[in-house]
Amino acid sequence: MNWIKEKVKSFVEKARQTFKRERPSKEDQAESMWVNCPGCNQMQLKEDLNKNFNICKCTYHFDLDPKVRFSEMFFDDGEYEIIDCPEWADPDPLNFKIGEKRFIDKYNSYKKKTGQQSAILAAKGVVNGLNIIAFGYNFSHGGAALTQREGEHLIAGIQKALDEKVDAVVSFYQSGGMAVTGNLNSLKNMPVQMMAMKMLRQAGIITIGICSSKITGGTFCNVYGNDFIFAESPKVENMLFAGKRVSAAVNKGQELPKDFGQASSIVDNGMIDGAFESRKEIREKITNLVRVLLKKSEIEARAESTSNVKVDIQSAS
C-alpha cells in the first residue's frame, strides 16, 4: 500500500506546483493599478482611491501620506511651514547590524522613499484661522518606528509650539512603536514625550491625537498624553499595545473578540473620546472643538481677572 501513498503524494505535489500562485512582491503591488480592499475584499482602482483621499466605497481607510493629508485635507490653502528635524539627531547610535546589513542603510532608504527627514512630518500652519502644529506619522518610513531621531523631531515641534504659543497641537498617529534597533535610546522617547505633552498642557495649548490603523507599542502609550483622542474612522484596526497573537497568548490562548483593537470597540469601552465617520470630517470638527475650548479658557481668564480686581478693591478699602 506504500506505493499507492507515494503515487498520491507525488500527484498532489505536482498539482500544487502546477497551480501554485506566486504572491506578488511589494514592487509588483506598488506598480499595480489595482489594490485589494481588506474591508470589502474587492479590487479597487488606485486612481479612484486617490481621488477620495484613500477611502474605499465601503468606508475602509487606507494609509494616507502625511504630505497629502496636510496639503489637500488639513492646512488652509495647503500651505504650511516644515519644522526641520535636528541634524545631530542620530537614528542609529548603536550602529546596529543584522549580519552584514546595517540599520542605517535601511533608514536612509526610508528617507529616500518618503522624502522626509524622519518618519515624522512636522509642520506649522493655519487651519480654519487657528495656528496649529501638526505631526504626521508616515508608516511607509519603516513602519514609522520611532528611533532617537523621531523623538528629537517631535521635541523640536513641541518646542516651537511652546515658543510661538500656538492654539493646538494635532498628531496623526500610525506607528509600530519604538525601534528595537535603538534599545534604550528609542525607549526614552516614551517618558520624554509624555513630559513634553505635559508642558503643552501647562502652557494652555490644546493637544489632540488622531488615530489611524496600526498603532502599537510605545506609540500606543504616548497617544494617551493628549487632551483628546479620536479615531479617524470606526474601522481603524490594531490599536493595541501588543499584537493580537501576543495578547491572546497573555490571556492563556483565550479567543479574543472579533472587534479586539478596533476603534468602535475602544470607543465603546471609553478608552478614547470618539471616532469620526471619515477622515474628511477631521479638519472642521477639531477646529470647532478647539474654538470652543479657547473661548472657555478666555471666559475663565476674564472671571479670574475680575475676581482679583474685587480682592484688590477690598484690600484697598
Image (cartoon, helix red, strand yellow):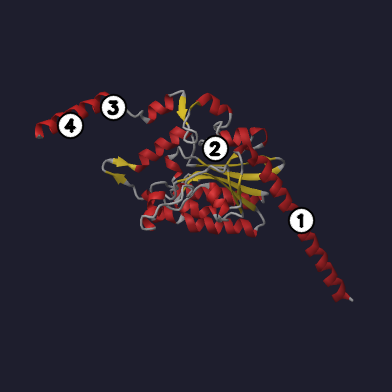
Residue sitting at 72 percent across and 41 percent down? 129
Cβ atoms under marks 2 and 3 closer than 8 Å: no
Earlier-in-chain disc, 1 versus 2: 2
Between 291 and 104, the one lying in front of the other is 291
Between 272 and 254, the one lying in front of the other is 254
Q: Which residue is mark 4?
A: 9
Q: Which residue is mark 3?
A: 20
In the rendered structure, which amino acid carries the disc numbered 2? Pro
Residue 309 x, y percent position in the rendering: 84, 67
Residue 107 x, y percent position in the rendering: 40, 40
Q: Quadrant of the C terminus?
A: bottom right
For marks 2 and 3, give the CA distance: 38 Å
The reply to whether residue 122 is in sight is yes
**Of the two numbered discs 2 and 4 in the rendering, the one whose residue sits closer to the viewer:** 4
Earlier-in-chain disc, 1 versus 3: 3
Is 41 rendered above or below residue 241?
above
For marks 4 and 3, give the CA distance: 16 Å
In the rendered structure, which amino acid carries the disc numbered 4? Lys
Q: Which mark is residue 66?
A: 2
For marks 1 and 2, give the CA distance: 32 Å
In the rendered structure, which amino acid carries the disc numbered 3? Lys
Q: Judge from the rendering whether residue 28 lies leftward or rightward of residue 117; answer left or right.
A: left
Is 37 rendered above or below residue 193?
above
Q: Which residue is mark 1?
A: 298
Residue sitting at 42 percent across and 40 percent down? 142
In what element is the residue under mark 1? Answer: helix
Residue sitting at 46 percent across and 28 percent down? 35
In what element is the residue under mark 2? Answer: helix
Q: Residue furthest front?
A: 1
For marks 4 and 1, give the CA distance: 78 Å
In the rendered structure, which amino acid carries the disc numbered 1? Glu
